[in-house]
Amino acid sequence: MVEAGCGGGGDDDAIVDDAALGIDADVDAPTDAADTVTCATPDTCEWLEDYLREQVGKLTGQRPAAPGVTIMRRASSTERTVARTYLVDELTRLGLAPTIHDYGSGKNVVVHLASTTGGTLPRIVIGGHFDGVAAGPAAADNGTGAAIVVATARYLGTRTRRDRAIDLVLFDQEEAGLIGSTAYALKLRGDATAVDSVHNFDMISFDGDGDQAIELWSPDAGLEAFYRSHAQPRGIPVGSVTFASSDHQPFVDRGFATVGVCEEFVGGDATPHYHRVTDTYDKIDFVYTTRVTRLLLAILEDRSID
Ligand SMILES: [Zn+2]
């Protein structure tokens, strides 16, 4: 599996040393070498599907998150602390600098990517909740969205040009009433932070009818048009519905240009394992998840360039 991010870790030195010694670095460390070559665009990012599998697997007990650490639930305070610690460790391993947004009853995990061009354009906010219901491993809801946020941080963190700063936020306590996202929306308003757009990913795991469609929840009109312009050439149908029960809503309520992204939850093509003990890793359609993630990466990268 993938051992280091596009820009992460100190393995590059090892590769150089191996090459200098005449050893074929590809034998021992194919992933790092390939990543730097294949991450030029979302569509050529070869690590993406394996990485999404790895992240969902580690968040749902399908594989250990760390030696001796297996995350089976992400509901109680203790369980969320273990999951949060894993996410901080993983983002750090990728060479990013995650911080904690402590709002009292819980803690969001935040990665801030600064503009590479030094401008002060309104920023992009990308989110997805990492907590889950107590009933089960919460692989679809929202292991998938959390994994997409981490993969997006990994991808966008390697871009050489980024006119807009980006906040990537793993929200705590969505299932307890959109608590972490509400706290973050309030923080942005309290700090008078200029925000271009908010994008929230919740449950991108299932495509029973095989049409590859996504559903946008209460999208800002401009963002909906932006999503459609990228989805259409990829052959990805886009539905649009009014729906309030996810982390996009606190941002909608406070006047941010916002979009929620999901499988067709309202449209009737959603996982039958929602909020059940059976919401497990093996039920995830990673081909669908990966295809949608490529679309999201393309949208977000485009949006980050003025
Ligand atoms: Zn959710």
Image (tube, rainbow, N blue to C red):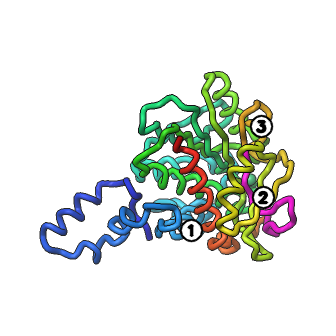
Q: Tell whether label 3 touches label 1 (CB within 8 Å).
A: no
Q: Earlier in the sequence, mark 3 or mark 2?
A: 2
Q: Earlier in the sequence, mark 1 or mark 2?
A: 1
Q: Residue at x 75, y 55 (%)?
A: 134
Which of the two discs, 1 and 3, sits closer to the camera?
3
Q: Is mark 1 within 8 Å of ligand 1?
A: no
Instruction: Return the mark for residue 215.
Output: 2
Q: Residue 296, image x and y in percent?
A: 62, 56
Q: Quadrant of the N terminus?
A: bottom left
Mark 1 element type? helix
For residue 233, which quarter of the picture? bottom right
Q: Is residue 249 visible?
A: yes
Q: Residue 170, image x and y in percent?
A: 61, 46
Segment colored magenta:
259-274
- What residue did someone put label 1 on? 53
- What residue did someone put label 3 on? 252
